[in-house]
Amino acid sequence: MRLEKMLAPYRLIAVSVFVFMISLYFFQARALLAVIYGVVGVIPWRSPFLDTDTVLSAIRCGRLGIDVFARNPCDDLGRVFDYSPLWLVGDALPMTRAWIAPIGMMVDIGFMIALLVLPVPSDRRSQTFMAFSAVSSGTFYLLERGNNDAVIFALIVFGALLIIRGGWASAAGGALIVLAGLLKYYPMLACAAFLRQRFRTFIVLSVMTIVMVGAFLGGFGHQLIRAIALIPTGSYFGTLFGASTLPGGTLEILSGSASLIRPVEAVLLILAAILAFRLARSTSLPVDIEQLSPPRRLLLLMGALVILAFWLTAQNIGYRVSLLLLVLPGLLALSAAKPKARLYRVATMFTVMLMWSEGFIHTATNLAPLSATVNLNTWIFIGVWLILQVLWWTMAVTLLAVVIVELRRPPALIAVLAWLRKSKAGGGGA
């Protein structure tokens, strides 16, 4: 990476903020850290890296012979282990609580390095949007918890950049993408982007995926079923978000039957799919995406697949918005290249707003009632909540349109079909 790119404004801002926060941590300035977290809308735990210890505590209890899928007394909150059993391979290490801070710091630094190598346009507007996103409430939340979504982000970024390089680097990059999927399930959908590669690369990546997934199921299949059954759900209000949040929360406000949530969600998803298909066909999106550089294009597709995967399948905690950073470089490049295209400007703005959704919810939750007779706080919160749901559904339509455009005629599939037609024609001629 050239020096001028390394010194890009958003990278300088991000590095400066992160180094400052790390310094406060090492100097044990917890009071000042709490103030900063409060400003961005994040409530810190009494000790950092709470989610890092979700994994490490399960490893510690597992070494004691405790079934962590049933109970986990080693965890500060008593949370049972509901992540992929692949994380538990660390039980061969002499894990203690002293490991929490070093490993949590490594998780955060890995995320920051991946963030800093993202390809970003050099215009001032793009740098500003990237800086606001890099130091958003979603990013602060992720790093304060030391959540393993930071690992997933890094694996996808480096995996995509390696695939672009071709050759054996593509195989290594594909392995990182599959590993991300085995560690957290939803990133496995990013493997659909392998269809965008050349035929030989696609075959190598496909075989590797089958081998890795097969080995995982063979070694952890029984534990995987138990872990998936433990994936939590929660209130439709607060920091959780997903496709079911809008229909579930709306029916709850209207005192509707809970049995209607799935049908209403299905109708909304059908409408979203129709809009996405129209967007893919009636705009210049296909032509514009073709003009993107390979790294931005692949990250945009993989990011869209990953975001749609977790948004459609689960209720997600606020720090997961940090994965929107995967699609932001592509959206910024489209916006910079086509400044009059409202679609890209709106999508970019919505992405940045969603990166700060934790802060918006925190502010709305803590507003004092403005009237002794009417609790405006409740209505303000509902208003903020509704706006965020509309933003998510709008982004889902946009990202689905990107996926439709990119996977409508994937090179690998076209090559396979051409080979089949050739083989059939050759057989018929004989």
Image (tube, rainbow, N blue to C red):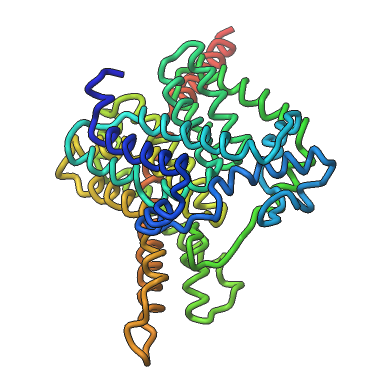
* Residue situated in front as seen by the camera: 52 or 159: 52
Identity of the residue drawn at 71% across and 36% down:
88
Horizontal placement of 308 versus 287: left or right?
A: right
The structure residue drawn at horizontal position 41% and vertical position 29%, both measured from the top left corner, is: 113
Toward the top, the furthest residue is 430
Q: Is residue 153 above or below residue 364?
A: above
Number of numbered discs visible in the structure rendering: 0
Figure quadrant of residue 388 = bottom left
Q: Position of residue 66 (x, y in %)?
A: 82, 45
| Image x and y of residue 242, in percent | 50, 57
Left or right, 302 with reference to 120: right
Give the image quarter of residue 224: top right
Q: Is residue 377 visible in this depiction of the protein?
A: yes
Determine whether, in the image, residue 227 is placed left or right of residue 116. Answer: right
**Which quadrant would the C terminus be assigned to in this image?**
top right
| Residue drawn where x is 31% and y is 19% of the image | 1
Q: Position of residue 270 (x, y in %)?
A: 46, 57
62 is higher (above) or lower (below) than 384 = above
